[in-house]
Structures are given as C-alpha cells and as structure tokens.
Image (cartoon, grey):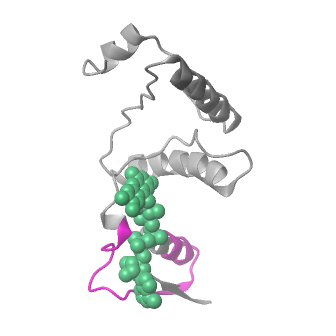
Amino acid sequence: MQVLVIGAGVVGLAVARGAACKGHEVIVAEAAGNIGTGISSRNSEVIHGGMYYATGTLRGRHCVRGRRMLYEFCAAHGVPHRKCGKLVVATNDAELEKIRTIEKQGRINEVEGLEMLGGNAARALEPELS
Ligand SMILES: Cc1cc2nc3c(=O)[nH]c(=O)nc-3n(C[C@H](O)[C@H](O)[C@H](O)COP(=O)(O)OP(=O)(O)OC[C@H]3O[C@@H](n4cnc5c(N)ncnc54)[C@H](O)[C@@H]3O)c2cc1C
C-alpha cells in the first residue's frame, strides 16, 4: 500500500525504512529543507540503557529493546559508535539509596550489565570522579 510519513526525523525515517523494507510504496514529507534537521540533529547521541523508566511503560520496554536493536543495526551497517557504559554516581547516603532504586528498576527492565561499584573501582574507570 502507499504510506505517507510526515517528518523526516529519526522516528519518521525509521518508520519509512520499516515500511519500505516490507515492500510498501513510501513517501516522506518534510517541512524543512533537509532530512534530520529537527530535534534529531541536536540530541546528545547517547544510546540510553533504559534503567530509569517505570515498570510496564512503553518507554521502559522500547528503550531496552530499541537499544539492543540499535547496536545490532550499527554493527550490521558499519555505523561507528561506542559502547562506553555509564556511571551513575552517588556521593552521599541519600543518593546511594536512589542508586539502589535505579538498580532495582534496571533489573526489572532487564537492563544487562548492571553492577554496583565502590569509589575506587569507579575512579579506575573515570579518574575525574570525586
Ligand atoms: C537536548 C536533547 C537531547 C537529547 N538527547 C538524546 C540522546 O542522547 N539519546 C536519545 O536517544 N535521545 C535523545 N533525545 C531525544 C531524541 O533526540 C528525540 O526523541 C528524537 O530525535 C525525536 O525524533 P523525531 O523524529 O520524533 O523528531 P524530529 O527529529 O524533530 O523530527 C520531526 C520532523 O518532522 C518535521 N515536521 C514536523 N511537522 C511537520 C509537518 N506538519 N509537515 C512536515 N514535516 C513536519 C520537522 O521539521 C522534523 O524534521 C534528546 C532530545 C533533546 C531535545
């Protein structure tokens, strides 16, 4: 069938590609002079882990699944990227409690590779930490 996608940001282009790969005739309509010049061109380029989002939310589900799919896509299509990991840092007891909550939520969201580190181990990864 004919598919009209409005907006050539990362979401619209991914939808358009998905439809085109399934054999549909796709038109992408973009108001700006070029593709990917909206919010997609200004983000921080982080591939998010997905440990923050509440249980059962679409964000929680899609962030983790989408991250795995994105790494696969990048590897398969030679898209340069770094899988550098992320440090979530607590500097006092109250923040430590928050980190435990994030870790628990991450495990519920099935985020892989979560690990609690002490200060020395964290500084070994990032010497600028204090
Ligand atoms: C400061 C900031 C940092 C971020 N950092 C990250 C990050 O590190 N990692 C991450 O995963 N996400 C990040 N995000 C979120 C991410 O950038 C957005 O979720 C994503 O880019 C949204 O893509 P989009 O295609 O929905 O929107 P857009 O990229 O804005 O695309 C929408 C397009 O639709 C066009 N359009 C709108 N209306 C019409 C119309 N009526 N007719 C035709 N065209 C139209 C616009 O011109 C635009 O090109 C960040 C967001 C911000 C604001």
Where 54 sits versus 33, above or below?
A: above
Which image quadrant for residue 98? Answer: top right
Q: Is residue 101 left or right of residue 72?
A: right
Q: Position of residue 20 (x, y in %)?
A: 51, 77
Q: Nearer the viewer, residue 8 or 92?
A: 92
Q: Position of residue 6 (x, y in %)?
A: 48, 85
Number of marks in the rendered image: 0
Where 28 sits versus 115, above or below?
A: below
Q: Nearer the viewer, residue 72 or 116?
A: 116
Q: Which residues are magenta?
A: 14-39
Q: Position of residue 127 (x, y in %)?
A: 26, 17
Asked if residue 29 shows in the view, the reply is: no
Q: Position of residue 118 (x, y in %)?
A: 46, 11
Q: Quadrant of the N terminus?
A: bottom right
Q: Residue furthest bottom?
A: 2
Q: Nearer the viewer, residue 33 or 120?
A: 120
Q: Residue furthest top?
A: 120
Q: Look at the image and say whether residue 72 sits in the magenta stretch.
A: no
